Image (cartoon, rainbow, N blue to C red):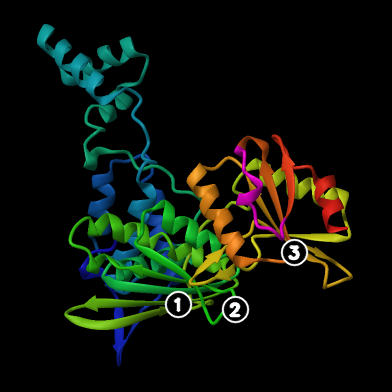
């Protein structure tokens, strides 16, 4: 996460406007990537010393430091391993030095020969577990444009780490945001907006907490790269910056690096059903994660919508109740009973032992074991 000194933004009224990197920054970003490549296989301290020198291609100092931080984060965990575990290398070299006398080069060559490595590899391994001595590893293939987007993302995440509250209005694929918020333990309420089925997430920000603010801020920031996978979104974060309360807004088109595509299916059970039904019924569209359904102040996220291609009136929502905890199943079925949806198919695992009284009265039920029978579902929709 970027430190306070590297936050780059302008305050326009009550809005905070991040100073994003763009195409005009690509030349010096390319030079920075080239500099990194020159130091692959060399100790980290040498790269850090070089980066403190005047750059070959001048760029804004703060933005350059931001990009350097992002590159350091990308390198984390990718540093090249030493040919010999450093502790073992030190133990053998020090033991040999205690037994024999002679030039250092001779000693290293003798130990290296017993280990089956070169003297240079042994020398590099001696202190390779110290941060400054770790060997620089190649980065994943990275263009200046991608580095700019990743740096912009880091800037937005750092600004949100100073938020007291965040609201996200999302349409399309909003389920992935809700799933992440729950998995990461974010303090979040989910509701519909104007009954339209769009998801509205209200989240507490790190500045509203008394402890664990750094971990919470990191978890909150992980929502940001998921936003571009929604059809539309609007994020508003109330941030405290230099003693002022400012609002950060994000919308589609803002230059932030998106996460890898979220998983299309929560389980192989869902994936197999979608594939089987598409193969069996080509005249039907299988829509994964359709718009959520408002139920009071909360939302239901059906697994699928089945839509006939030539008859718009023939549309069914389908939920697969598979391997979940009893409490989860009970809550899910209670919401569906309250929703009273007319065209609903529930595919229920026989092992769930759901009583008929627990099921929504208007729902069609398809029981299954291990795999949902696509032909049985097709018979339901006619």
Dot in front, 1 or 2: 2
Q: Nearer the viewer, residue 337 or 308?
A: 337
Residue position marked by numbered label 3 in the rendering = 343
Residue position marked by numbered label 1 in the rendering = 24
Tell me which label, 1 or 2, sits earlier in the chain: 1
Badge 2: residue crowd in 10 Å (few <14, some 14–19, many ≥20):
few
Q: How many marks?
A: 3
Q: Position of residue 53 (x, y in %)?
A: 24, 61
Residue 3 can be seen in this image: yes
Question: Does 340 sit left or right of 190 as displayed?
Answer: right
SS for callout 2? loop
Kindly report the distance in space between the C-alpha atoms of the residues bearing marks 3 and 1: 53 Å
Badge 3: residue crowd in 10 Å (few <14, some 14–19, many ≥20):
some
Q: Quadrant of residue 25?
A: bottom left
Residue position marked by numbered label 2 in the rendering = 196
User: Which residues make up the magenta segment?
Assistant: 352-363
Q: Is residue 115 above or below residue 235?
A: above
Q: Position of residue 360 (x, y in %)?
A: 65, 57
Q: Are marks 3 and 1 in contact (CB under 8 Å)?
A: no
Residue at the spot 66% in from the left edge and 65% down from the top edge? 290
């Amino acid at each position: 996460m970027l430190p306070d000194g590297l936050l780059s933004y302008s305050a326009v009224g009550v809005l905070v406007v991040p100073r994003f990197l763009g195409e005009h920054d690509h030349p010096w970003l390319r030079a920075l990537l080239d500099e990194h490549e020159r130091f692959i296989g060399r100790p980290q301290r040498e790269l850090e010393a070089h980066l403190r020198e005047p750059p070959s291609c001048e760029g804004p100092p703060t933005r350059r430091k931001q990009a350097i931080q992002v590159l350091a984060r990308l390198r984390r965990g990718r540093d090249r391993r030493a040919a010999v575990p450093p502790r073992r290398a030190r133990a053998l070299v020090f033991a040999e030095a205690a037994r024999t006398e002679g030039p250092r080069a001779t000693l290293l060559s003798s130990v290296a020969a017993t280990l089956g490595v070169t003297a240079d590899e042994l020398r590099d391994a001696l202190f390779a577990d110290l941060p400054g001595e770790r060997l620089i590893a190649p980065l994943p293939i990275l263009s200046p444009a991608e580095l700019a987007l990743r740096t912009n993302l880091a800037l937005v995440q750092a600004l949100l780490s100073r938020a007291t509250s965040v609201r996200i209005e999302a349409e399309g694929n909003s389920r992935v945001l809700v799933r992440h918020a729950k998995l990461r333990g974010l303090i979040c309420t989910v509701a519909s907006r104007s009954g339209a089925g769009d998801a509205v997430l209200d989240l507490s920000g790190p500045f509203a907490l008394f402890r664990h603010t750094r971990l919470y801020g990191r978890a909150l920031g992980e929502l940001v790269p998921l936003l571009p996978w929604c059809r539309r979104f609007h994020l508003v974060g109330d941030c405290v910056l230099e003693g002022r309360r400012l609002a950060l807004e994000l919308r589609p088109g803002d230059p932030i690096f998106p996460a890898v595509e979220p998983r299309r299916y929560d389980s192989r059970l869902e994936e197999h059903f979608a594939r089987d039904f598409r193969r069996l019924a080509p005249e039907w569209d299988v829509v994964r994660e359709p718009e959520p359904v408002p139920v009071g102040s909360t939302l239901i996220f059906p697994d699928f919508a089945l839509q006939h291609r030539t008859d718009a009136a023939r549309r069914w929502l389908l939920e697969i109740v598979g391997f979940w905890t009893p409490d989860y199943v009970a809550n899910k079925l209670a919401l569906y009973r309250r929703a009273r949806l007319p065209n609903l198919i529930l595919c229920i695992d026989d092992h769930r032992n759901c009583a008929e009284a627990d099921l929504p009265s208007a729902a069609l039920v398809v029981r299954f074991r291990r795999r949902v029978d696509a032909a049985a579902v097709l018979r339901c929709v006619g």
